[in-house]
């Protein structure tokens, strides 16, 4: 397995939020307080670096709730390894977001 890339503090925080159960952009923005201009480019970089994978929800699910479809993200094995390294580099990261705080 390749070694995970070093993440910036922002990238690590966003990956931690995804890992904690905040799988789409707006929920990540809500939990981190970061603006869309920070979150979405970071998600694209995390996906490019194969730290997260994404999938679009079905149009019917979104339509049923009266909103646009969401793109859902989840960490890959490489992303989880990057989080382990990042939590050592940024010790406060582990306590930032827990699965119980996940936005629904």
Image (tube, rainbow, N blue to C red):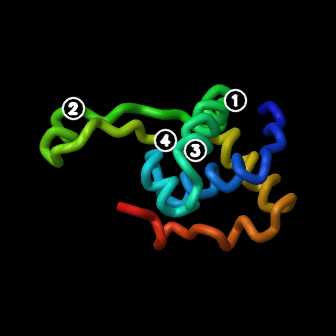
Task: Measure how far apart labels 1 and 3 are at the Cα level.
Answer: 15 Å
Residue pointed to by mark 2: 59
The residue that disc 1 covers is: 49
Residue at the disc numbered 4: 73
Mark 1 packing: few (<14 Cα in 10 Å), some, or many (20+)?
some
- Asked if residue 61 is positioned above or below residue 59 in the image, the reply reads below
- Residue shown at 53% from the left, 34% from the top: 53
Q: Earlier in the sequence, mark 1 or mark 3?
A: 3
Residue at figure coordinates x 21%, y 32% from the top left: 59
User: How would you rate the neighbour count of disc 4 (Cα within 10 Å): few for under 14, some for 14-19, many for 20 or more?
Assistant: many
Dot placed on the residue nearer the N-terminal end, 1 or 2: 1
Q: Nearer the viewer, residue 52 or 63?
A: 63
Tell me the quarter of the picture where residue 55 sits: top left
- Name the outermost residue toward the left: 64
How far apart in space, not on screen, are marks 1 and 4 (Cα)? 13 Å
Q: Is residue 40 above or below residue 32?
A: above
Residue mark closest to the camera, 3 vs 4:
3
Contact flag, marks 2 and 3 (Cβ < 8 Å): no
Q: Nearer the viewer, residue 36 or 58?
A: 36
Dots 1, 4 in contact, CB < 8 A: no
Return the mark for residue 95: none
Task: Name which of mark 2 and mark 4 comes first in the sequence.
Answer: 2
x and y, in percent, of residue 39 in the image: 58, 44
From the viewer's perspective, is 72 left or right of 2? left
For image coordinates 63% across by 50% down, the residue present is 15
User: Does 22 sit left or right of 70 as displayed?
Assistant: right
Residue 89 locus on image (x, y percent): 86, 58
In front: label 2 or label 3: 3
**Pointer 1 with pointer 3, Cβ within 8 A:** no
Query: Nearer the observer, disc 1 or disc 3?
Result: 3
Question: What residue would you read off at disc 3?
Answer: 39
């Amino acid at each position: 397995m390749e070694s995970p890339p070093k993440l910036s503090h922002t990238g690590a925080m966003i990956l931690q939020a995804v890992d904690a159960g905040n799988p789409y952009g707006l929920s990540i923005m809500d939990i981190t307080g970061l603006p869309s201009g920070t979150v979405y480019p970071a998600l694209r970089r995390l996906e490019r670096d194969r730290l997260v994978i994404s999938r679009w929800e079905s149009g019917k699910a979104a339509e049923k709730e009266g909103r646009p479809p969401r793109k859902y993200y989840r960490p890959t094995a490489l992303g989880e390894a990057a989080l382990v390294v990042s939590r050592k580099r940024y010790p406060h990261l582990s306590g930032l977001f827990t699965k119980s705080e996940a936005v629904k």
